[in-house]
Amino acid sequence: MTAFILERSPVTVGLRDMLRAALGVDYKVEYGESPRDIVFDAQNRLVHPYAVIYQFSSFDFYGSLAHPDDGASLLYQITSVGRTDESAGVMSDRVRRAILERTASGSFTNQINAGDSMTVISRRQREAGMLVAESGLWNAHDLYDLEVQANG
């Protein structure tokens, strides 16, 4: 049996893809940078809010004594950006709902596909950020923990 090696990239791509699907085409989601195809109106104002995912480089392992790296908690900051404080706050709420919403049976409504070797087993919001005006736009910086477990 091959040892499990945690790779952040499949989790990050899975999180981005899940948010894109859950939020729809009008609400762009990118990793590490603003979307290149955001839409502005005739007065050069942002039409739809968007989100940017930032992955923290460290993570906490919590596997068994024999295999401490079989599970880990990864930390992400998701920055929701809008033209107004209200639109940034609404985008932040949409992101939160997409990540944390559960069905009546308790499973997550939107699944994060982390590849064949890992499963995202738990999610929680660590911190809700304050709305801040930066460069003419409003931002909400929220922190989320995703717990990942090795498959098999």
Image (cartoon, rainbow, N blue to C red):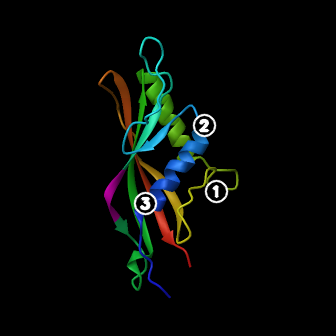
* Amino acid, disc 1: Ser
Helix, strand or loop status at disc 2: loop
| Residue 91 appears in the picture as rendered | yes
Quick check: 149 above or below 52?
below
* First reached walking from the N terminus: tag 2 or tag 3: 3
Q: Position of residue 80 (x, y in %)?
A: 43, 35
The label number, if any, that marks residue 24 in the structure image: 2
Mark 2 or 1: in front is: 2
Residue stretch rendered in magenta on the structure: 55-59
Please tell me in which quadrant of the rendered image residue 140 appears: top left
| Residue 100 appears in the picture as rendered | no
Measure the alpha-carbon separation of dots 2 and 3.
Answer: 22 Å
Q: Which residue lies furthest to the bottom in this view?
A: 1
Tell me the residue at 54%/36% (across/down): 94
Q: Name the residue under label 1.
A: 107
Question: Which image quarter is the C terminus in?
Answer: bottom right
Tell me the residue at 46%/23% (across/down): 86
Q: How many labels does the image show?
A: 3
Tell me the residue at 59%/46% (across/down): 101
Q: How crowded is mark 3: few (under 14 residues within 10 Å), some or many (20 or more)?
A: few
* First reached walking from the N terminus: tag 2 or tag 1: 2
The reply, left or right, for residue 120 in relation to residue 138 is: right
The label number, if any, that marks residue 33 in the structure image: none
- Is disc 2 in contact with disc 3, using a CB cutoff of under 8 Å? no
Q: Mark 3 points at which residue?
A: 9
Quick check: 150 above or below 58?
below
Measure the alpha-carbon separation of dots 2 and 1.
Answer: 21 Å
